[in-house]
Amino acid sequence: MFEQMAVLTDNDFRREGLRGRIITGYLPLAANIARRYAGRGVGMDDLVQVANVGLIHAVDRFDPLRGVDFLSFAVPTVMGEVRRYFRDTAWPVRLPRRLQELRMAINTADAHLSQTLGRPATPADLVELLGIPETAVREGLQAMHSFRSVSLDQPSLSGGLPLAEAIGADDLALGSVDDLESLLPLLRALPDRERRILSLRFFGGRTQSQIGTEIGISQMHVSRLLRSTLLELRGHMLAAPQERERMV
């Protein structure tokens, strides 16, 4: 039928009929190729649709005058279309093109070696066949997992808790660690009375009147001491580290 199509013009309705019959006849081939890529995070219907697009491209591009049979041309064309689909759209975790192509090369080599050796291919087997460093092979093997993503709501393997609860979060208190470390020597350098007033007010939860009664001074005096001490500490904290060390 390809020879018949070749002698017909694009406007000839008979050519379109022949084209449709060829495509329909090879749809099982496209479906079979699509099944090779099942289980990689893409639905089977989508894979078949992409493979069918590749089949249409193969039919439209095939030249019977080159002396090559259609199957030899169609299979790599359809597989290439499916692989491009995975490369361009089907990655939950977007990888650089280099890793995508490396993963595909390793996948093809692994299938060939498994059939030839009668056992799963080892990284050393892949290194020998592909002629690339072992680190590149292992990197490509890890990239194979990028077709699948795991929900954070899925229970973990250990405790049964959702994975999201096992992921660390920012500790807001860490932001104040440096400030606390800088403040401690300044507090130690304060006179005993001022340091005690701060302790009673901010750690003991006492009111200014209660502090005044305990220390033996008026509430107004406590207020003035608190204000002046806090202003002094604030000035030291805002100073450069070298200047702050001289103040202690």
Image: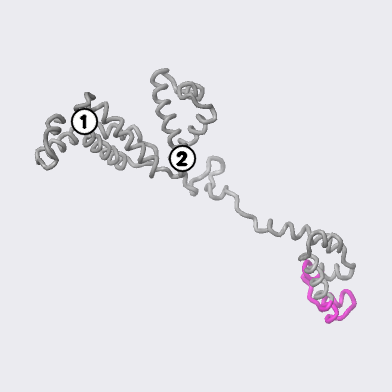
Q: Which amino acid does label 1 sit on?
A: Asp
- Disc number at residue 194? none
Which element is circle 2 on?
Answer: helix
Badge 2 crowding class, 10 Å Cα cut-off, few under 14, some 14 to 19, many 20 or more, is some
Position of the C terminus by quadrant:
bottom right
Q: Which of 107 and 244 is in front in this view?
A: 244
Quadrant for residue 49, please give it: top left
Residue at (79% x, 59% y) in the render: 241
Q: Tell me residue 142's x, y (percent).
A: 50, 35
Please report the bounds of the magenta region as a residue range. Answer: 200-224
Relative placement, left or right, of 230 versus 52 is right
Q: Tell me residue 83's x, y (percent).
A: 36, 36
Q: Which amino acid does label 2 sit on?
A: Ser
Q: Main secondary structure of the magenta part?
A: helix
Q: Tell me residue 238's x, y (percent).
A: 76, 66
Quadrant for residue 3, please give it: top left
Relative placement, left or right, of 25 versus 243 is left
Instruction: Residue 208: say if magenta.
Output: yes
Residue at (82% x, 75% y) in the render: 228
Q: Nearer the viewer, residue 3 or 80?
A: 3
- Disc number at residue 63? 1
The residue where tag 2 is placed is 146
Residue at (48% x, 21% y) in the render: 128
